[in-house]
Every structure is written in C-alpha cells, then in structure tokens.
C-alpha cells in the first residue's frame, strides 16, 4: 500500500467518524430533557443488564476515568439509584447494582432511545436495514474484541450467499496471493454445479453465521458414489483459529457419513497454511502433492483425504 492509499483510508475513517458523531448526537436529543448526561445513561445501561459489577469493570467496559466514575457512582448512590455490597471474592471491591429506583429511572430513557432508533430504521427498506446492521456488525467485529466461536450458528445458505462466497474468496485470494480471475471462474463453476444439481441427499452446504453475517462455509459435493469432496471451505481471516473451521468441517463430515460416503477429499495449495492446519486437525492425511500452474501462479497443489 502506498502512502497516498494509506492516507486516503485514514481520511475515510475520519469522515465516517464525523458523520457518526453527528448522527449519535441527533439520536440522543431526548437526553436534553432528562436529568442524566449521556455518560450517566451509558452507566445505567451497563448496570441494567442485570449483572452486578465492580467500578473497575465498569470503567474498563465504558472507557471512563476512575475518578470521574467514582464521583458519578457516589451521586447515583445518593439518589438511591444504585446499591453497593462487598465482593465475596475481593474485599477491596464493591459490587454495584441498580436499585428499583434505578431501573425505574432508566426504563423511560431506554424506551425513548429505542423509539428514536426505530424511527431512523423505519426510513429504510427491510433489505437496507439488514445491510446496515450487517455493516455495523462487521465494524464491531473488526475493531472490537474478538467474538467467541460459540456465538456462531451453523445453518443452510440463504439465496445469494453462495454467490457472495465466490465474490469474497475471489476478492481475498486476489489481494492476498495475487490469484487471477480463473480462480473466480473455478469457484463459480462449483456453485453453479452444486445449485443446479440440487441433490440434497448426496450434497450439502453449511455456512457459519455470526449476527447475520456469513463468516465461514463449506460444501460437500459428490466426486463418485463413495467419494465426496469439500469445496468452498472458508473462514473469515480475522476469525481463524477460533474453532469455526473445525465446526463446519465436522458438520460436513457428519453429513458425508450419513450420505454413505467412505472418503472425503480436499484439494488445496501448500501456501495456504490455515487450510493445511485445519486438514491436519480434522484428521485428513496428505496423499499427493505436485507442482502445477494454477490461477496465474506456480503452486504446489496438495490432495488431502479422510477415511469415513
């Protein structure tokens, strides 16, 4: 990436920050009519989730200065909005929870905030709302703490998602490894053949869904009456090594066993370290490797097999 390209990206992030800051300000106009500041509402919201927390945990979660938070909590306690009790595991810490009055004070603020967001979303079509929420989840995923693998749901692909997998993988492998458009053509043929055959008895596709976004996938396709192949195996790069790949491969393996196959195969390149690692962990064995010219590159193509 050139310095110019890096600067353009930095300016794009700053432009979005300015837009979002203005939007958030407009969405919190109801606070002007309340006795609480935005920061106080954030603390009330955190405590309203029902789990007593210490001041240090609250401060880290909300990014608040400890002295400022201490004064805020003292004010809340004076107004009978919170209670504090000693922690059973650390006598130096107090567990903070909302009182009945605290819940009653927060409830109308929460309802008003929900209504403002609903009014904003109501201006968009249902498809646009889903697109917006997906983009927000992606920003949170890429910039926030890494989500746990158990937040992922395995399900059948929805219309358009197989085509999205072609787009996503072709885009990423071109950027990461310089593979040419023939790779996209290969992926497109896999999807076209799989969807045209529509053989739900012998073939299978599963995607990993995290908050409505596809973060992984694999397809099982028939190679012969006894052999099936794994195709379109994918886990989003920022979510690799979190168990998602093992879950989707295990699901594909169970399907292949139920369908009566005796062997699963997977073809990959030696440069794809994560794919090779996943094969080994899932019990596949490397049975063949040979140099080939593929996707505009000289690659070592490997064939992996798993007996069922």
Image (spheres, helix red, strand yellow):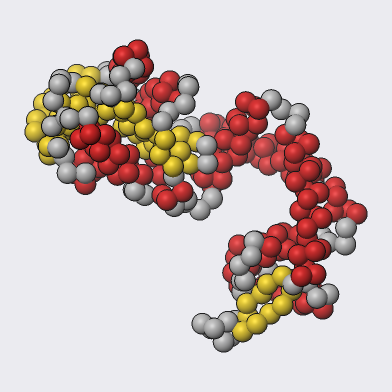
Residue 201 falls in image quadrant:
top left
Q: Residue at x 76, y 29 (%)?
A: 123
Residue 203 on image: x %, y %: 28, 24
Residue 263 falls in image quadrant:
top left
- On the question of residue 71 being in view, the answer is no
What count of labels does the image hold? 0
Side (left or right) of 277 relative to 114: left
Side (left or right) of 161 relative to 60: left
Side (left or right) of 165 relative to 39: left
The C terminus, quarter of image: top left
Question: Which one is nearer the viewer's eye here, 194 or 14?
Answer: 194
Residue 25 on image: x %, y %: 80, 46
Q: Residue reaching furthest right?
A: 33
Question: Which one is nearer the viewer's eye here, 20 or 7?
Answer: 20
Q: Residue at x 75, y 46 (%)?
A: 114
Q: Is residue 60 above or below residue 33?
A: below
Residue 28 on image: x %, y %: 80, 48
Residue 294 falls in image quadrant:
top left
Question: Which one is nearer the viewer's eye here, 199 or 113?
Answer: 199
Q: Residue at x 54, y 50 (%)?
A: 144
Residue 306 on image: x %, y %: 15, 37
Q: Is residue 25 above or below residue 305?
A: below
Q: Residue reaching furthest left?
A: 287
- On the question of residue 209 being in view, the answer is yes
């Amino acid at each position: 990436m050139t310095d110019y390209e890096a600067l353009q990206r930095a300016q794009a992030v700053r432009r979005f920050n300015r837009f979002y800051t203005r939007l958030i300000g407009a969405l919190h106009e109801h606070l002007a009519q309340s006795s609480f500041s935005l920061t106080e509402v954030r603390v009330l919201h955190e405590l309203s989730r029902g789990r007593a927390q210490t001041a240090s945990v609250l401060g880290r979660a909300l990014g608040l200065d400890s002295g400022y938070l201490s004064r805020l909590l003292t004010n809340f306690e004076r107004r009978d909005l919170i209670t504090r009790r000693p922690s059973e595991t650390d006598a130096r810490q107090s567990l903070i929870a909302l009182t009945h009055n605290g819940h009653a004070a927060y409830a109308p603020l929460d309802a008003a905030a929900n209504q403002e967001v609903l009014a904003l979303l109501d201006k968009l079509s249902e498809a646009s709302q889903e697109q917006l929420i997906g983009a927000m989840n992606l920003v949170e995923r890429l910039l926030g703490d890494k989500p746990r693998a158990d937040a992922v749901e395995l399900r059948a692909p929805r219309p358009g998602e197989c085509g999205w997998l072609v787009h996503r993988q072709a885009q990423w492998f071109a950027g990461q490894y310089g593979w040419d458009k023939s790779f996209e053509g290969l992926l497109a043929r896999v999807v076209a053949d799989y969807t045209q055959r529509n053989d739900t008895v012998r073939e299978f596709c599963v995607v990993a869904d995290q908050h409505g976004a596809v973060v992984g996938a694999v397809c099982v396709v028939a190679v012969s009456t006894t052999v099936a192949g794994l195709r379109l195996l994918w886990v989003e790069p920022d979510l690799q090594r979190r168990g998602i790949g093992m879950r989707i491969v295990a699901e594909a393996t169970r399907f292949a066993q139920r369908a009566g196959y005796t062997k699963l195969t997977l073809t990959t390149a030696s440069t794809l370290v994560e794919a090779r690692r996943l094969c080994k962990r899932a019990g596949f064995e490397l049975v063949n490797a040979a140099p080939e010219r593929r996707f505009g590159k000289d690659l070592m193509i490997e064939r992996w097999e798993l007996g069922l």
